[in-house]
Image (cartoon, grey):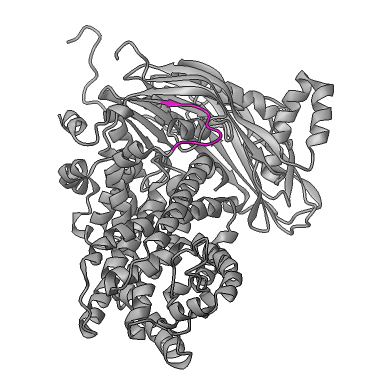
Amino acid sequence: MDLSAAAVGPGERPEDQQVVIEPRTGWQLINLGELWRHRELLMFFTWRDVMIRYKQTALGAAWAILQPLMMMIVFTVFLGRMAKVDSGDFPYPIFVYAGLLPWTFFATAITRAGNSVVGALNIVDKVYFPRLVFPFASVGAAIVDFFIASTILICLMFLYGITPGWSILLVPGLLALATMAALGVGTALAALNVAFRDFKYTIPFLMQIWMFATPTVYMNVQDLAPPSSASQQAVAAEESSAASPAAGTREAAKPEREQERGSLSAGIWALLHLNPMTALIAFFRAATLGGPLPWKSLAYSASVIVVLFAAGLLYFRRVESRFADII
Amino acid sequence: MAEQPAIRVEGLSKSYRIGFDRAKLRKRQLRDTIVEVLAKPLRHLKQGAALGRTEEFWALKDVNFEVQPGEVVGIIGRNGAGKSTLLKILSRVTYPTEGRATLRGRTGSLLEVGTGFHPELTGRENVFLNGAILGMSRREIKSKFDEIAGFSGIESFLDTPVKRYSSGMRVRLAFAVAAHLDPEILLIDEVLAVGDVEFQKRCLGKMREVATQGRTVLFVSHNMSAVQTLCSRGLVLRSGRLGVDAPVDKAIRQYLSYLSDTAADAFTEHNPERRGNQAVRMTGACIFDENHEPTQHLIAGRPATVEVHYVNPSRARQVDLYFTIFNHLGIAAAHCNTVVSGETPRRAGSEGRLICRLDNVALPAGQYLIALSLHGDGAETDLIPNALVFDITSSVFYKSGRLPPMQFSTCLLDYQWEHEVAETVSAAGG
């Protein structure tokens, strides 16, 4: 009979055979095994998010491309042409698109993840499965958007005659880091949003501010390398609009001013890198368009991302047992 | 595994922190009255200190039971007795505050049909999504898809977005998915309450099928006849505690007699069943027999009177009373109101008394519950589902003084027999 046939399928999970339900308080581990067993459901939710996102829109999935593309045009006109923001060795449009692409992914993923649990109240209240599926699926859907929008970057590279080097192979790793960052922030916001609906209004605003606080999206922050103890490489972020070759000569010319500025820029450097997207975006641009790869910055950011990821997920796990009660 | 219970619940408790909104305040007061009797001075002090902050409310308290594999158990109780909370804990939607529950076997919960249905997706897409949400694997859904589509009876609309479905079609599709869930333990909450009669019948049929397949089922419902036909055992919850754990007939009887006991405070603030804004409010009601003696025992075929007192602080200009008589299975047996009868002056006073004279109580033997609903200017202001109870034990309705079997009737019809025969058979047989 079909009951036994079904029981042999992937739905049969020995771990499900006995479930002990007990009070839950305090911190919980992130049960990756359980999440893995629900990967099909995760795929379903990701697929649903992708499917419904552009339903009954005239342009459909083109929206995934249009958003960063329009931003690129606006940034090119106002920052590139009018404010003449430094874009390093690249034409401003492709420079800014290479920054907007990962940023848009990050912002979309967080916005959608942040609203994922609140948007599924009727499910949270009725069926059990790991609650992390909701924000994870939202981030998954944003990855799909990222791939769609990537085609424009490829077109632009073709247009400007930029041939990527071997470093383009690092992009999946960067995407993984950005995904972890988005998951960390997104899950925390999703959990906070359940208790405080204020976050529904805060998230779009937060992402806007965050973008401007991530200067690598729209301008060339010349040297992301950390200031060494002798502050040899200290180039303050506020100087970044100066031409790049000047940095080395100025450094040698004014060592005593450098000393002063070294401490200052160390502060700014740390502040900039507390925001993991700063280095991630710079690295993404360097990996795709070419240029020196800011490994040290990336390493620093990666550690921040790991902390964010763990903190976000742990917070989510801590409060998820109350979701159905406070919704 | 056969010796081990499928479900074991030990000391399960759940408390909610509640604010002071009105509906919950009433629950709190209900609890308070119970608590006050037990630990008056101390608790009173504590509550004084807690006032103005949040208050703890025990939706479930120290519930213990076991369910053997293959048992079909009904959970019954009044609103707010903790039935849904119990099912939510067993479904792992929410967590207990104390105690533990152990479930052995693949568990499926059906607290609602069509959970996660998305209006923008097509019927086909929703079948997959809903199936996955309920715990089916993709392969499982694929293999059962044709069966599900056939059961729903809406094959030709499967590629139409669900938002264009009628609500009936949506429910059919949702139930078709749910019906093909194959867990060893099934937790079901009130799903039969939705849909039309035809659909409910179908649900019951499917449920009966499930119940006979040796699966363990825990079933919460207000529909006593559904509980009675499906379940072999009943658990009665009272204010979060397990009151009765008995064979289903006994459990239902105890539940109904408990309901009648609580009818004493039906008109107080403490009645958790009471609903409405109380703009026009009932203050009391009584049933009288033909001699105008208050009674709870009526005789089928004799007159009776139902009186309801109300106060009208909001000065509603028109007051209407609706009442429904439910039998021991929770089935509505009869309904009376001031609107359809077209004879009662409906102009209201600042207070008043509505009197309904029943010329002939044409009901079979059994226990009955009257739900009263008072309307002020057309809107329901006060609803008391457990307002009055009475029973019928004897009858003068038919000449024999006997009554038809109660499982076959909800009311009595007045009829005359004629018997036309060709030739009377003689006693000797020819």
B102 within the magenta span: no
Q: Look at the picture and state if B227 lies above or below A199.
A: above
Viewer-side residue, B113 vs A216: A216
Q: Is residue B315 above or below residue B191?
A: below
Question: What segment carries the magenta color?
Answer: A20-29
Q: Residue furthest top?
A: B428
Q: Is residue B155 left or right of residue B247?
A: left
- B238 vs B267, left or right, is left
Which image quadrant for residue B425? top left
The percent position of residue B309, horizontal first and vertical second, equals 75, 41
Q: In the displayed structure, does residue A11 sit left or right of residue B246?
A: left
Work out which residue is located at the far bottom of the displayed protein and give it.
Answer: A82
Regarding residue B1, the answer to whether it shows in the image is yes
Q: Quadrant of residue B426?
A: top left
Q: Nearer the viewer, residue A182 or B353?
A: A182
Residue A254 in picture, x, y percent from top left? 55, 78
List x then y, in percent, for residue B168.
Answer: 34, 53
Image coords of residue A302 (percent x, y) = 41, 55
Query: A176 or B265: nearer the eye?
Result: A176
In what quadrant of the picture does the N terminus of chain A appear?
A: top left
* Residue drawn at 66 percent across, 27 percent down: B262
- Please say whether residue B165 is visible from this viewpoint: no
